[in-house]
Image: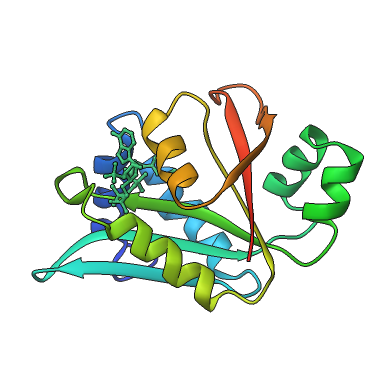
Amino acid sequence: MDPLPLSSTLREVYRSALGAGALSEDWAQHRLPLHAGRADFIFLVAREAGEICGFAYGYTGEHGQWWTENVARSLTAAQRAEWLDPPHYEIVELHVRPAWQRRGVGSALLAQLLTRQPHDRVLLSTQTGSRKARGFYAKNGWGELASVDFGTGYPPYLVLGRRI
Ligand SMILES: CC(C)(COP(=O)(O)OP(=O)(O)OC[C@H]1O[C@@H](n2cnc3c(N)ncnc32)[C@H](O)[C@@H]1OP(=O)(O)O)[C@@H](O)C(=O)NCCC(=O)NCCS
């Protein structure tokens, strides 16, 4: 049984945005329920013409969490002091169905998440090889902070930050 009522649709959006190799099953079954219990969890869905065309979510990141510890190792001491030690929000996933991309849906989801989250600095990671995502975040005012190695099986990532 799906852990969340919408999870099969969300899994399909995730897979369609990231491609066939996306670990959508692991995400829907394990990571999303774990993340849903974290502080300040916010999950936004975009609907157009009755269809879910994208989603975004995040939570307040903390030392001790897998993502934060990997990012901490990749930042300089000064960057850690600026971005990780103060209260900060973490955007975990942001995906738009290919048929709905480049119509402003991703930017609207991102803007709404930034408006609703409680902190003055926000972090995320994206694949170094994704020109699309890097162009998207640059256009939305995000700066690239450092390369991040999440370990075996993960492609190269970049960590990005934005002050609010
Ligand atoms: C990245 C993503 C969320 C953007 O969503 P979107 O709804 O297409 O974004 P918007 O329409 O709000 O913004 C479009 C802007 O993003 C950038 N962009 C989008 N597609 C691009 C592409 N193929 N190449 C280069 N830049 C691109 C451009 O700056 C574009 O602005 P423009 O259309 O004026 O040139 C979406 O492409 C997506 O889901 N990609 C796959 C999953 C992913 O990479 N998620 C982010 C990982 S954290």
| Residue 47 position in % (x across, y down) | 20, 69
| Residue 91 position in % (x across, y down) | 55, 57
131 sits left or right of 147 in the view: left
Answer with the quarter of the image where residue 4 lies.
bottom left
- Residue furthest toward the right? 77
81 sits left or right of 2 in the view: right
- Total tally of numbered discs in the picture: 0
Q: Quadrant of the N terminus?
A: bottom left
Name the one closer to the observer, 94 or 8.
Answer: 94
Q: Is residue 78 above or below residue 123?
A: above
Q: Is residue 75 above or below residue 62?
A: above
37 sits left or right of 83 in the view: left
Give the residue drawn at x 62%, y 21%.
152
Name the one closer to the observer, 98 or 160.
Answer: 160
| Residue 164 position in % (x across, y down) | 63, 66
154 sits left or right of 161 in the view: left
